[in-house]
Structures are given as C-alpha cells and as structure tokens.
Amino acid sequence: MPTKCWPRAIEEPENTLYKFEKALPVVYTENDLARVFAQDGAAVKRAEKLFARLDCAALTFLIDAWQALVEQVKAPS
C-alpha cells in the first residue's frame, strides 16, 4: 500500500462515523471490552482521517488494478 495513503501499519478497532444534518457527528467503535459512542471533536477528526486514508488506499488499489488491466489489453498476444 502506498505510504502517502497509509503511512504506518495501523491496527484500529472497527469505527463508524455517523454524520447528521442537525446534530453533531458521532463516532462508534467497539472492541472486546467496550462499545463506545463519542461526539468529541478529536475523536471525530481522528475517524475522518482514518476514513480519508481508507478512501485513498481503495482508490489507489482501483487505479493500480485498472492500469494493470489496460497494460494487459495493450500487450501484444
């Protein structure tokens, strides 16, 4: 995975970020010990950064796969 998207190996618990029109965003996370809902600004920003890195990694994977497919089609048989 490119380092610009995922600078370090991260073992994060599963996170869910809920955004609402008329309320503060909520981050939900759980592990073996607890289930936590947080509206703290720092928790929301951390979740947003995590999802931005995941988006970047997913897009990079798709672009790489597309480029490999294009090269395969262009290659002479």
Image: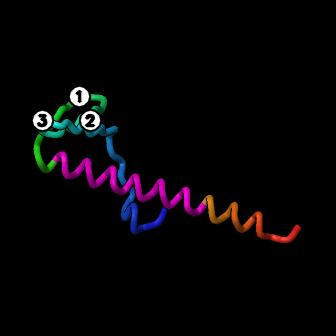
Color scheme of the displayed model: rainbow
Q: Secondary structure at mark 3?
A: loop
- Bounds of the magenta segment: 43-64
Choose mark 3 or mark 2, whichever is in front: 3
Establish if 48 lies above or below 5. above
Amino acid type for the residue under numbered disc 1:
Arg
Q: Earlier in the sequence, mark 3 or mark 2?
A: 3
Q: Earlier in the sequence, mark 3 or mark 1?
A: 3
The structure residue drawn at horizontal position 23% and vertical position 28%, both measured from the top left corner, is 35
Amino acid type for the residue under numbered disc 2:
Thr
The structure residue drawn at horizontal position 19% and vertical position 52%, both measured from the top left corner, is 45
Q: Crowding at label 3, few (<14), some or many (≥20) Cα neighbours within 10 Å?
A: few
Q: Would residue 52 be counted in the magenta stretch?
A: yes
The structure residue drawn at horizontal position 45% and vertical position 57%, both measured from the top left corner, is 57
The structure residue drawn at horizontal position 41% and vertical position 59%, both measured from the top left corner, is 56
Q: Would residue 37 be counted in the magenta stretch?
A: no
Labels 2 and 1 touching (C-beta < 8 A) = yes
The residue that disc 2 covers is 29
The residue that disc 3 covers is 23
Q: Which mark is residue 20?
A: none
The residue that disc 1 covers is 35
Q: Nearer the viewer, residue 63 or 33?
A: 63
Screen quadrant of the C terminus: bottom right
Q: Position of residue 6 (x, y in %)?
A: 39, 61
Q: CA distance from mark 2 to mark 1?
A: 6 Å
Q: Secondary structure at mark 1?
A: strand
Q: Position of residue 13 (x, y in %)?
A: 32, 40
Q: Position of residue 44 (x, y in %)?
A: 19, 46
